């Protein structure tokens, strides 16, 4: 129970009544002093009226006593009059790293209108905007108070109770209430980002000839049929042997390859634990994997998943369909980075044993440590004998920023030079992988999803995106 601002002012204003006699006596005394200086008369003594002060003190006490009774009455009416029900309106799953729309729905079953301030007890690490929600609930009415929540970690998190501060009908008292609303909410990888990219991906797929679920003509690697050349065709698609046989220009029509095996290898070791903004590199990699599973449905590819660090944590054999996408989502939403050594050879040997058939293997990792990078290069020689490899190297943005700085002191110079040496060694490693026949995509975390999708589409359709 707290007083409102109105109550505080009503308590302070009667104090001025007690000062009136003192101020009146002081003004009379100052006037007498000034008059004595002009007329050389005897100064007037300072003589406030103590009887007036005593009277005003009793008046002040009576006013403040009545105000206190009104304050207590207002608080009692608030406790008894307002019957409030609160529920939390949210999606079944929250998405990591993006603003989720939530709302508190407050129902007033009482007869009086209630002005209130609400605060939802969200997980401490999540960012909420705004933290305090102001609203007015009419009698037998409902009000919806929306807010935005930015989760910064994946997994299961507990939402606490809802705290309300209700204003009394007289406007004198705030009464605090706590409504039981405790629940556990799962935070999944960025599902909202998948929907947000969907329009962009759809237009990209249509442009490259690969969105429709039937045979995807116009681009790709598999021959479909011949047809007469049109002015819109690429001259490189002209089949000169067929042209010579038929005596007119003939175009070769290709289709995108279907039902290929795609395996995502996800490194959850210490290099993927670095945060870039609110998310870790691992979070960005998981978002990219889920986006790729969404895009690949148009090509009906078989998707598999390998999660590893010092050992293999999870393996999902390649399969297709929405059920596989749901299985990916369930497997990845609780994966956390581990501050440990990454054993690439063990992980890749396990993959070869489980899936020796040739597949496009997309490896999400970061290669900065010299020792780890050398072990990755050695393990690649084994894996590329069986699979077509694409390394998606997630760059360290803070290190890039440090290397781009101009040093201002000796200590800064050493830091900058070390950062530049590390980036130079990393670039040389990526070039050596490309010389060995391993495809490399070097990108920053914020661009990982878009760049991974574009490279996948390029590989599927043969069109550079």
Image (cartoon, rainbow, N blue to C red):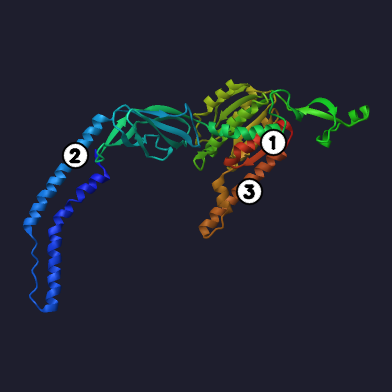
Q: Which residue is mark 2?
A: 70
- Residue under the image location 21 percent in, 47 percent down: 10
Point out the residue furthest to the left here: 51
- Residue under the image location 81 percent in, 36 percent down: 234
Circles 2 and 1, Cβ within 8 Å, touching? The answer is: no
N-terminal of the pair, mark 3 or mark 1, is: 3
Circles 3 and 2, Cβ within 8 Å, touching? The answer is: no
Disc 2 is placed on an element classified as helix
Q: Quadrant of the C terminus?
A: top right
- Residue under the image location 13 percent in, 49 percent down: 60
Q: Nearer the viewer, mark 2 or mark 1?
A: 2
Disc 1 is placed on an element classified as loop
Disc 2: CA contacts within 10 A as few (<14), some (14-19) or many (>=20) = some
- Residue under the image location 14 percent in, 78 percent down: 38
N-terminal of the pair, mark 3 or mark 2, is: 2
Residue 371, x across and y down, in percent: 59, 41
Q: Nearer the viewer, mark 3 or mark 2?
A: 2
N-terminal of the pair, mark 2 or mark 1, is: 2
Q: Camera-side residue: 272 or 235?
A: 235
Q: Quadrant of the N terminus?
A: top left
C-alpha span from label 2 to label 1: 80 Å
C-alpha span from label 3 to label 2: 75 Å
Disc 1: CA contacts within 10 A as few (<14), some (14-19) or many (>=20) = some
Q: Which residue is mark 1?
A: 438
Q: Which residue is mark 3?
A: 424
State the image quarter where residue 463 is shown. top right
Residue 105, x across and y down, in percent: 39, 30
State the image quarter where residue 295 is shown. top right
């Amino acid at each position: 129970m707290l007083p409102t601002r109105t109550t505080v002012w009503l308590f302070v204003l009667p104090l001025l009544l007690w000062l009136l006699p003192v101020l009146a006596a002081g003004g009379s005394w100052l006037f007498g002093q000034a008059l004595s200086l002009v007329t050389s008369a005897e100064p007037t003594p300072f003589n406030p009226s103590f009887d007036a002060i005593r009277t005003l003190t009793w008046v002040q006490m009576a006013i403040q006593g009545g105000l206190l009774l009104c304050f207590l009455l207002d608080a009692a009416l608030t406790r008894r009059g307002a019957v409030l029900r609160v529920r939390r309106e949210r999606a079944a799953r929250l998405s990591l790293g993006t603003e989720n729309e939530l709302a508190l729905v407050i129902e007033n079953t009482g007869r009086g209108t209630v002005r209130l301030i609400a605060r939802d007890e969200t997980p401490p690490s999540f960012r909420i905007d705004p933290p305090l929600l102001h609203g007015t609930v009419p009698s037998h009415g409902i009000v919806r108070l929306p807010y935005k929540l930015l989760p910064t970690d994946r997994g299961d998190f507990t939402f606490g109770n809802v705290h309300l501060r209700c204003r009394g009908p007289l406007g004198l008292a705030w009464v605090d209430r706590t409504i039981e609303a405790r629940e556990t909410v799962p935070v999944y990888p960025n599902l909202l980002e998948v929907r947000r990219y969907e329009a962009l991906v759809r237009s990209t797929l249509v442009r490259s000839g690969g969105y429709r679920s039937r045979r995807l003509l116009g681009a790709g690697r598999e021959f479909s049929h011949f047809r007469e050349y049109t002015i819109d065709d690429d001259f490189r698609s002209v089949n000169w042997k067929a042209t010579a046989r038929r005596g007119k220009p003939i175009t070769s029509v290709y289709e995108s390859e279907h039902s290929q095996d795609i395996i995502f290898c996800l490194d959850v070791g210490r290099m993927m634990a670095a945060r870039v903004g609110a998310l870790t590199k691992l979070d960005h990699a998981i978002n990219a994997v889920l986006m790729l599973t969404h895009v690949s449905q148009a090509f009906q590819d078989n998707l598999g998943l390998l999660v590893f660090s010092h050992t293999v944590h999870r393996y999902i054999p390649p399969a297709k369909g929405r059920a596989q996408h749901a299985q990916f989502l369930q497997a990845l939403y609780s994966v956390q980075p581990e501050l440990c050594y990454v054993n690439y050879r063990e992980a890749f040997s396990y993959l070869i044993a489980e899936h020796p058939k040739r597949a496009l293997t997309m490896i999400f990792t970061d290669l900065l440590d010299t020792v780890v990078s050398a072990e990755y290069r050695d393990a690649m020689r084994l894996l590329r004998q069986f699979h077509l490899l694409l390394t998606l190297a997630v760059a360290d943005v803070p290190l890039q920023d440090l290397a781009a700085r101009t040093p201002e002191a000796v200590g800064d110079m050493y830091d900058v030079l070390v950062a530049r040496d590390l980036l130079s060694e990393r670039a040389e490693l990526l070039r050596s992988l490309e010389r060995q026949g391993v495809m490399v995509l070097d990108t920053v975390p914020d661009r990982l999803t878009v760049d991974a999708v574009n490279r996948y589409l390029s590989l599927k359709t043969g069109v550079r995106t």
